[in-house]
Amino acid sequence: MLNKVWKLNKYYQLLALGAVSACISFTAQAADEQFNEALRAANSGDTALLQQYQYSMQNDALGYYPEYWILNTNLASQPASQIASFAQRYPQSAMAEKLAADYVEEKVKMADFSSAQPILQYVTNADQAETCAVAQVRARSGDPLVFAEFKDVWLTTNSQPESCTGLGRMMLSSPLMTEQDRQQRLWGQLRAGQSGQAIATAQSINMNLSLAQLNSIQSDPINYLWSAPKNTKEEQAYLIYALGRLADSDLSAAMTSAKRAVDGVPADVQRALYRTVGYIGGTTVMKNNFSWDVLNYLDASYGLPFSPEEAEIYARQAIRFSAWESLIRAINSMSVTQRQEDRWQYWLARASEQRSDASSKRTAREIYKRLAQGDDYHNLLAKDHVGQSYSSVPSNVQPSNADAQRLSQDIHFRRAFALRNVNAPDNYINREWNWAVRQAYLKKDDGLLLAAAKRATDMGWYDRAIYAADRTVNQHNYSLRYAMPHQSYVVSHSRNAGIDPAWAYGLMRQESRFVSNARSHVGAGGLMQIMPDTAKLVARQMGETYNPAALTDMNTNIRYGTFYLSMIQSQLSNSPVLATAGYNAGPNRARRWQPEEQGIAADQYAETIPLTETRDYVKHVMTNATHYGLLLGQGAQSIGKRMQIIPMRSAQ
């Protein structure tokens, strides 16, 4: 009887504990739900209501958001002390860092550098625009050496944030910028047609350029070049400007005109003229196709300093035409940091091994051996070059119970999970998650990253799980890093389409990170990011009636995506590399980028794809496919076997 009473008491105790636990969970959920209500108040500019939420949410994981939104209203008018106070009360948090970075940007726009200065210490993850804003504040606060870190901004002629353009103008008055630096900047601006900026740069080296003359040249550059005077520095500057304007509209005519333009001018101006044609030709491959002549002009410009961007353009042109000595020159022209990237180390090895001397071949082998230690794209290529088999991934380390407990206590991850639980907008969820991952990565806390990846995977939140698992430093879990959801569908549909399921998985991981409702800015949807027009084509080929709603169905999306991948592979010389490029940029472009005279190695084709997005996409997909091949039990992998010679383009 006593035993029975004890059991009943225990039963009621457990019930009570469960009720308390449920109550706590419900209370936390209800508190988090206030986030969306507070966000609506923020979007409508209701500061009074936000202040109420600031009070009611103050003890919640998401409690700092109402105050963030209040401060973010008229951010530029806030005193620096308010921003600093927020950052100190929520140290190393995602929104404190964002608030601080945005505040510095706003103050720099107003040229209020003194207000921005005390906030710099809270900006720890700046993007390009914020980095340039921070640099401006540092310079105005008496740190002129900061300019030495920003030669890429100084020489960039592509579109860049206003804070970076402003930093360039600030650098123009710095005595640290030599006359050669100013000359290099001027010639780049003239080549790019940036007449206003070029005039300002010219004035800093006592050159007077006329805007009226520049406008006149722009209206008819070819006629100007025909009889252009070349005696003074100003006249030589006009020559570069004219050749750039012509190359931009008619590259062939510019190549012809360059031969006449270089007559009788100093050697450095000759090189600047050659660089103008070579650079513009190298950056307009989408319009003008690949050309040996472009590489020849870049070769002829050697001896003039290369900006980081110019050196990469030179290197890619050399890679395209297997001009290995030119490639070595291009890599040697890069900055030390740029040259040490795995990409350029790999290509230095590729070029060095083409030389006949034993020393160069030994250098190449040493680089390959060093690169072969990793497992990213260039590391996998290097493994092939040293005959190293890729036959096993590191043991899948599982997070411990202690790691899982720390995850539950980590405020950064708690915020991310709380936001997802209340279906907050993705930009808030992803910002908190990515911030949490960054904090763990900086501490090399692999256990916490794996615990986060495991919990996210269990929730089917694959994109963030991969983001976390990808960043472990010493302990890894490739099952989390290379997730394989819907495996039976992916494998069966791939085999029915006659393609490798590892490749399909590699492409899917890159396209959507397995977010089934993913939508791109151009309208592509689902796991394999299929465009509506592509889906209509596939449905027609498969003898089915197209139904727009079907694309959101996981099974149909995979079936259509694998069929389309197979279809374009058969159109593109049965090459997975060409088909991967075609899947991203369109089959016609992938075909157009094929060589015209003889086949080239697939790594050369991939590295010289003129669209940066597609170039990176192909590398990622082929890397993913190699890892998935191993995880799907296909035996030892070689990325080279997936990247066979790219044949000549056949006549259409």
Image (cartoon, helix red, strand yellow):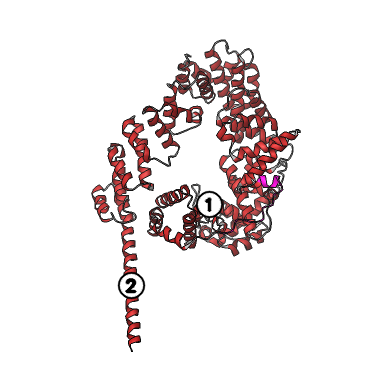
- In which quadrant of the rendered view does residue 482 lie? bottom right
Disc 1 element:
loop
- In which quadrant of the rendered view does residue 635 lie? bottom right
Q: Is residue 562 left or right of residue 102?
A: right
Query: Disc 2 to disc 1, how far (Cα)?
Result: 39 Å
Tell me if residue 533 comes above or below residue 289 in the rendering: below
Q: Which mark is residue 470?
A: 1
Outermost residue, bottom direction? 1
Q: Is residue 393 magenta?
A: yes
From the top left corner, tell me how far across and down residue 438 is, in percent. 45, 48
* Residue type, numbered disc 1: Asp
**First to last magenta residue range:** 381-396
Disc 2 element:
helix
In the rendered image, the quadrant that contains the C terminus is top right
Between 94 and 429, the residue placed more toward the observer is: 94
Q: Is residue 196 left or right of residue 318?
A: left
- In which quadrant of the rendered view does residue 251 lie? top right
Give the residue drawn at x 53%, y 50%: 473
